[in-house]
Amino acid sequence: MVVGAAIIADGRVLACARSAPPEVAGRWEFPGGKVEPGEGEIAALVRECAEELDVRVEIGARLGRDVRMAHGRSVLRVYVARLLHGDQPKALEHSELRWLSAAELDSVPWLPADAPIVAALRPLLTNG
C-alpha cells in the first residue's frame, strides 16, 4: 500500500515534482510513500510528509478511489490533509513544489497513478 496526501491550503493543493528515478523525474505527484509493515496508513502519511517536506500534517478524509500503480503491484490511497502550525513545505526529496489552484491542476504532467485523483480533488478546490 502506498499513501499520498492532497495537502490543501487557501484553495490550492501542493504538487511535488519527482527528482528520481530518471524514468519519472519531472512528473508530478502528491507527497507520500509506502506504508511500512506494522504501520497504519495515517501514521505512514504523517511520517512521509515529515520526511519529504519537513511539515506536520493533519489527515482528513480519503479522496477518490484506490488507484492501481504501475504493473499492478501496489495500490495508491490518497487522503486530504492540511498543514499544522504554520509549517511551510520544503523540497527535501523533490525537484520542485507548487501550490496549484483548480484551474492550474492540468498545468503539470501528473504521474499516471496520481492523475485520477486530480478529478476527485477539483471540486474541493473549486468549492473551498
Image (spheres, grey):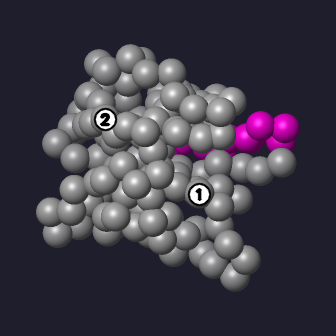
Q: Earlier in the sequence, mark 2 or mark 1?
A: 1
Which quadrant is home to the C terminus? Answer: top left
Residue 126 seen in this snapshot: yes
Q: Main secondary structure of the magenta part?
A: strand
Where does residue 119 sit, x and y in percent of width and height? 48, 27
Q: Is residue 88 above or below residue 40?
A: above
For badge 2, the amino acid type reads Arg
Residue 69 drawn in magenta: yes
Check disc 1 and report the residue beneath it: 33
Foreground residue among 97 and 42: 97
Residue at 65% x, 40% y is 21
Q: Residues within 10 Å of mark 2 (few under 14, many from 20)?
A: some
Going by the image, does 87 lie left or right of 106? left
Instruction: Please report the bounds of the magenta region as a residue range.
Output: 62-72
Rendered image quadrant of residue 59:
bottom left
| Circles 2 and 1: CB atoms closer than 8 Å | no
Where does residue 120 sit, x and y in percent of width and height? 47, 34
Going by the image, does 20 lie left or right of 75? left
Going by the image, does 6 lie left or right of 64? left
Check disc 2 and report the residue beneath it: 98
| Structural distance between the alpha carbons of marks 2 and 1 | 19 Å
Q: Is residue 114 above or below residue 78?
A: above
Which quadrant is home to the N terminus? Answer: bottom right
Where does residue 69 sit, x and y in percent of width and height? 73, 41
